[in-house]
Amino acid sequence: MRHFLLPLLLVLFPLGISANNDKDTSASSLSTGANQTVNNPKFSVTPNGRLLIDGALYASPQKYMFSDGMAISEARVGVKMGYGKWSSWIDVGFAYGKIGLRNMWIQYDFNSHNSIRVGNFLMPFGYQSPLTANNKPTFEQPLVSALYTPGLQLGLMYTFRNQSFYSATAVHMESSALTNVMNYPQFTQQGYSLLTRFVWRNRNALQSGAPIINAGISLGFSSPDRHLVNDEDIHDGFTNSANFPTKVSNVTAISATVANAKNRFKLTPELALAYGRIGLESQYFFQTIARRKGLPCFNSQGAYVTLRGILIGSDYTYDEANAQLVNPKKNALELVLDYNYASLSDSHAGIYGGRANSFNATLNYYFNQYITARLNYSYTHAWDRAGFDPITQNAFQLRLMVLF
């Protein structure tokens, strides 16, 4: 953690100087690409937020595990700020009766190709990693992606991008760095993770009518996280867990905790293609955890493939800044089909966290840039989890999503 504090202070200090030396506080829209005039920077403040309201009906042999109903699966309110090459974002989230800070970051753009970000934000690992809930085309992100994508974490990231390449490299602390007060010696032994994402895309991906090709690979290396044994934190474990793809009734589908761990290595190649109104997105995940005391490594893997089609509306476009397909524009109707498989069971290591496969069909209607409605059917089957019988879930779901 000491090594993390120094770059944080170096970023914060010049921001404070720049803001205090300029008295112009007129508002303008924030651009994280540093498009504001550098010679005459202006301070901008833009409020933002989102609201997700879900309804769900379930059919399952284990119906007692899934309760029909409605939920505010997420509500966020926050603010974006900009000053010349500096930008910042902070928001607060509410879900299931709990309030917590979500995005909290500061970014400096050296130019249109290079930037550095510090704080709590989505870490780069795989195609889904830059996507927030409102940008994901599926109702919920694929179950296998939820297992391996780190989500919001406290760390530091450097990003490079041009017409042909996108790359992001980050280091982040373990999740408990934000949720637990750590005293010595826990403070000095926090787990960390190094993550990288490299993407190649065809140079004419932004041209109207041209095919879109996005191919990349992400790599990750981590030290063990917080792991309590008899109320003692020995920092020697990793946990992978994912729920069934619904927010109204939160039930764990597969989960594995690996103790006596030394380190973790994971990778995911990614592919996204689009031509006209047809798109495809896919990832394969592999993870291996080395263990102490002569124990065999624990290996896990999974994959998903998503087929997208715009039934009403214009062609797919490409987001060069984040290396991903852009959701359709207003008054568009989109059909999204997704299949994914995940395994957290390894007989050689003697760990049975379960296996799951899931099929999802989602119909998205984009009323405008602020309001989207989603209708979803999902089938998920989980089995081979130690201490649990197989579980099958059929879910019929509706979501109204409002962005502002």
Image (cartoon, grey):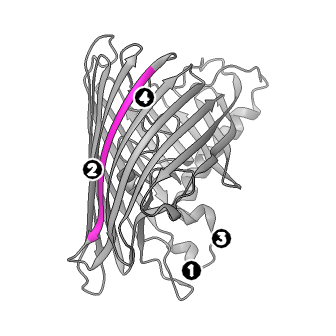
Residue neighbourhood size for the residue with mark 3, other residues' Cα within 10 Å, grouped as few (<14), some (14–19), many (≥20): few
What residue sits right under mark 2 in the picture? 303
Cβ atoms under marks 1 and 2 closer than 8 Å: no
**Mark closer to the chain start, 1 or 2:** 1
Q: Which residue is mark 1?
A: 185
Crowd band around label 4 with a 10 angstrom C-alpha radius: few (<14), some (14–19), many (20+): some
Residue occupying the point 54% across, 38% down: 398
Q: Is residue 58 above or below residue 165?
A: below
Tell me the element at label 4.
loop
Label 4 is placed on what type of residue?
A: Ala
- Relative to 352, is 237 on the left or the right? right
Disc 2: CA contacts within 10 A as few (<14), some (14-19) or many (>=20): many
Residue that badge 4 annotates: 321
Q: CA distance from mark 3 to mark 2?
A: 36 Å
What is the magenta range? 333-345
Q: Which disc, if any, is residue 181? A: 3
Nearest the viewer among 26 and 213 is 213
What percent of the width, then of the height, locates residue 381?
34, 58
Foreground tag (1 vs 4): 4
Q: CA distance from mark 2 to mark 4?
A: 25 Å
Q: CA distance from mark 1 to mark 2?
A: 38 Å
Sequence-wise first label, 2 or 4:
2
- Horizontally, residue 312 falls left or right of residue 110, namely left
1 vs 2, front mark:
2
Q: Quadrant of the N terminus?
A: bottom right
Q: Nearer the viewer, mark 2 or mark 4?
A: 2
Label 1 SS: loop
| Percent position of residue 23, x then y | 79, 25
Name which residue lies at 63% across and 47% down: 70
**Which label sits in the foreground, 3 or 2?**
2
